[in-house]
Amino acid sequence: MLVTTFNRRMNQLLYSLQDKQEHIIQQNILDLYNYILDPEFNQYLFQLCYLFYVTEDKMLKELLYNYALTNNANYYRLQWTLMALNENSNYENVKNGFSTFINVILLKFMLNQQLKEEYVLELGTQIGNNQKSINNIDQMMKNCIKSYREIQDKIIFNLIEKSLRLKKIDIENQKDHMSRFLSQINKMIANLRIQEQPEFRGLTIPFNYGNLDSFLIVNLLEDEFTCFNTAKRVPYKIIIETVNPSELLLIQSVNQLCQENQSELIPFYDIEKEMKTISQIKIYQQYNIEELKKLAFKKIDLQNLSHIQNLTKIKEKDIYVSKSQNKSIWGEDWNITKQKIKQNSQYGNLKSHDVRQIIIKGGDDLRNELLIMQMMKKINEIFKQKQLKLFLRPYDIILTSANSGILEFIPNTVSIDKIKRDNPNLSLRQFYLKNFENFSDAQKNFAESLAGYSLICYLFQLKDRHNGNILIDNEGHIIHIDFGFVLTLTPGNIGFESAPFKLINEYEELLNGKDSDIFTYYQVLIFSGLTILQEHVSELLTFVKLMNFSTRNNLLACLENFNMIEFKKRFHENVNQKNLYAIVENLVKKSSNSWKTILYDYFQYQTNTIYY
């Protein structure tokens, strides 16, 4: 049975909190201690922190304390999640309580007995039998952790701040600026290698997917990065090397640099002071609202769209920096790149050594996207367990504040926007025929992934589906990213994208037309996926119910006007298979070449130069 024990425990906790059954609440929280080291605990941490936020339950607080003490990654995962929930609170008593809570966690972490023993062991050769030094170990460890926290926070917030400040730098100067910046960050990371405690010898990032023990960043590749220039900010991709800190005991510290290098970085920058609300940022960075309303409520002859005037085209371009000489639009295969980096790395011989691509993003509320990604990950697990052919590619989202975060970059992908920029005269079908040796395999992958994301778009009302947010991987799968506009949220709040999902003529052409076998296969896959999900509605709703526990303290914009009944209806739980297939056919029909979908692509081209 796919419904996990942990999921059931969370449901039981929710119901006991709703019923205010104190003894049952206590028992449910005690049961969760059995899962504190389970990766699934990490997946529900967002919900657990929110429940603590709205209930201030003492046992739940103690559970989170103990979670934070397990390792440095869990400490930061908890701290950042609490910060993301707390920063825009309108309730001062809650904000003050959260600040106190975070400080107490830090103090408990400093006095953690296991860490203390490791710290004493590390210093053993230095302190010898000096009892006075041993008695001062608490203060020494406090100073060590305090110093590490200050450096860690400085690096993280400078990384986040850079995605906002890059916008003020001319595009032609961004390459040199980023190279210098990453070099400075690397110097700060190198300075951490002199720390006695292994967990403090690099930058801590609490990843949720992949090798969870490999959470310590020991190096950034200074000559491998991409700057994604958008209308308001510049998110950027970097490549990092990570290890399990316990393995650092096996190697000597290398290339220790002077502490004075730390001062080369620009001072801490208060991101929040220079940001409007997320909804304002999202709207003003992309849309002229009055123009959008005119277009949205007036059906236009799509053959004469070129006559629309007064739309300012913003010419932006991305900056790609890489050693690879591969001429493919996808660049060098990521597995080959990883192997090369591993071979040349001083940490490559460690079992935990990993190489990751991450995107640093400031000025975006990623909390809504995180909620959808949680459910999407669960749906993907369901599809795999039932051996369905629908393809989805969830990605890691790490909150660092209410308006910033770190995202996993999906390797071997390129946006359809870039495909169209580089191949302006090719349709998607022509692109596939030109770039995939086995067209039929790539076409099948496209159908299976299009079916998966059609379901995701329909169930979660995913909007803002321009070609900058849709990728193609080197196997032919289509992959959607950037889930900022979901459920009740729409760009400009005017409901512009009204089709259930994006199904334009180019997609249908790639699938040999609507009368083809492969198109029927695509439609059957949607039906099969929806049929299976009917059995798991309760499990999926757990994520939303937990975050919607208190309407008074709702923190997610996508849940402000959320209707649970309408959401459940989209799963068509009590509909038989014959009628369900008819519903799927109707969804496909409504989506097929929708004029509003086409108009939205055109508008994004005119305003943000996103090709279609």
Image (spheres, helix red, strand yellow):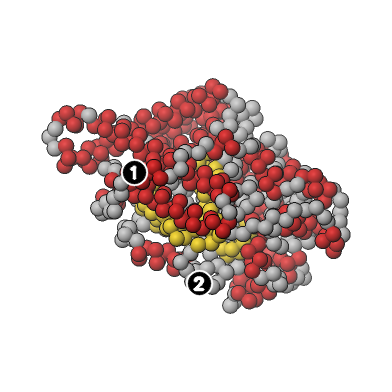
295 is higher (above) or lower (below) than 157: below
Residue shown at the point (46%, 43%) measured from the top left: 266
Q: Which mark is residue 41?
A: none
In depth, the one of 281 and 262 nearer the eye is 262
One can see residue 255 in this view: yes
- Name above or below for residue 518 compared with residue 567: below
Q: Find out whether the residues at labels 1 and 2 contact each other: C-beta distance under 8 Å.
A: no
In this view of the protein, which residue sits in the foreground, 547 or 124? 124
Residue 384 pos. (x, y %): 55, 58
Above or below, comparing residue 521 to residue 501 in the picture: below
Instruction: Determine crowd level at label 1: few under 14, some 14-19, many 20+ residues with C-alpha closer than 10 A.
Output: few
Say which label, 1 or 2, has the lower sequence index: 1
* Amino acid type, callout 2: Asn
Q: Residue at x 56, y 51 (%)?
A: 169
Instruction: Please tell me which residue lies in front, 491 or 32.
Output: 491
Q: Is residue 259 left or right of residue 490?
A: left
Q: On the picture, is 201 further left or further right than 472?
A: left
Mark 1 → mark 2, Cα distance in angstroms: 39 Å
Q: Secondary structure at mark 1?
A: helix
In the figure, is residue 332 to the left or right of 288?
Answer: left
Name which quarter of the figure residue 578 lies in: bottom right
Say which residue label 1 marks: 260
Q: Which mark is residue 326?
A: 2
Q: Is residue 462 left or right of residue 357?
A: right
Residue at the left extreme of this rendering: 129
Please, what is the three-letter code of the amino acid marked with disc 1? Answer: Glu
Mark 1 or 2: the one toward you: 1
Q: Nearer the viewer, residue 250 or 154?
A: 154
Residue at 39% x, 63% y is 341
Q: What residue is drawn where x is 82% and y is 55%?
A: 309
Q: Position of residue 525 (x, y in %)?
A: 66, 61
Q: In the rendering, at what x and y percent does residue 446 appear?
A: 64, 66
